[in-house]
């Protein structure tokens, strides 16, 4: 075989090899494109699902907020402040002017001032009117978006306690302002639980001590000794039925 024939044969073989390589490259590109499209589709589906949950949760909170304000106006509770915080739910607080003469809690005490029991009773009545335990029945479509297998939907009543900035002496009943604020939250929570007869697992408390004062200009002011109540729709792990929690 002549030299030019050998060169020509090698060129033909190289061309065939190049064509085979290009075919594999095309297959690889096609597979990669298909996988990329599948990945984008999965991400889009997850994003849609997440947005649906976020949207329906916001609808639930907004509807609850409207209901709270409706009952508040109907009951004439002008002293009750309400706010839709979204992240923490509906915040309800008693107007600071109510405590202008006498605080809700005496200094270094967790016992609710008996003078304010009528306000507590009105809050109990408001909670009963809201029928929080039936919210799932009123908005089944929205709740079903949030709820996963093995979970329950509840509207948690979360009570947060606060103190002024006066430090504990170490000689009293409470070791710190954090303990005192948590017990103040518990005092209000227990009254609401007893008189509403709602399950214990529907309640939660938190104590923030002197942090987040109502009157930041004077952290020692008596008005900083207070509680805040939040209504928070949420999904929690399912438990056995336990009547009263």
Image: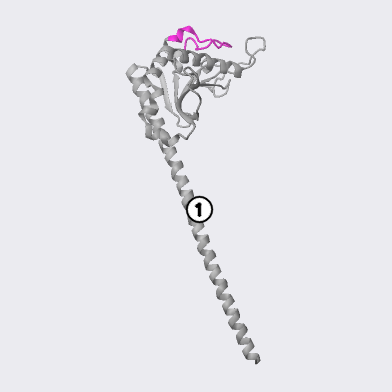
Residue ID at (44%, 42%): 51
Residue nearest the observer in this picture, 21 or 85: 21
Specify the quadrant of the image occupied by residue 81.
top left
Residue nearest the observer in this picture, 170 or 216: 170
| Span shown in magenta | 100-117
Residue 191 x, y percent position in the rendering: 48, 13
Residue 116 magenta: yes
Residue nearest the observer in this picture, 104 or 183: 183
Residue ID at (58%, 75%): 18
Any part of residue 102 in sight: yes
205 left or right, relative to 143: right
- Residue for badge 1: 39
204 left or right, relative to 48: right
Q: How is the image coloured?
A: one colour
State whether residue 55 is above or below residue 11: above
Residue 16 x, y percent position in the rendering: 57, 78
Residue 161 magenta: no
Residue ID at (48%, 53%): 40
């Amino acid at each position: 075989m002549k030299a030019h024939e050998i060169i020509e044969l090698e060129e033909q073989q190289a061309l065939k090899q190049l064509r085979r390589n290009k075919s594999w490259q095309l297959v690889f590109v096609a597979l990669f494109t298909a996988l990329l499209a599948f990945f984008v589709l999965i991400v889009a589906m997850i994003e849609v699902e997440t947005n649906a949950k976020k949207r329906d949760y916001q609808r639930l909170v907004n509807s609850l907020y409207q209901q709270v304000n409706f009952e508040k106006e109907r009951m004439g509770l002008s002293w009750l402040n309400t706010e839709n915080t979204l992240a923490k739910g509906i915040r309800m607080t008693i107007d600071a002017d109510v405590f202008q003469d006498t605080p809700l809690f005496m200094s270094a005490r967790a016992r609710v001032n008996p003078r304010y029991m009528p306000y507590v009773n009105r809050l109990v009545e408001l909670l009963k009117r809201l029928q929080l335990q039936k919210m799932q029945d009123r908005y089944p479509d929205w709740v079903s978006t949030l709820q996963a297998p093995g979970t329950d939907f509840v509207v948690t009543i979360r009570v947060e306690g606060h103190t002024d900035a006066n430090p504990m002496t170490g000689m009293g009943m409470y070791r710190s302002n954090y303990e005192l604020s948590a017990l103040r939250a518990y005092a209000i929570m227990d009254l609401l639980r007893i008189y509403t007869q709602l399950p214990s697992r529907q309640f939660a408390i938190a104590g923030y001590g002197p942090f987040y004062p109502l009157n930041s200009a004077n952290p020692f002011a008596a008005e900083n000794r207070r509680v805040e109540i939040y209504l928070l729709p949420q999904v929690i792990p399912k438990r056995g039925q336990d009547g009263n929690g």
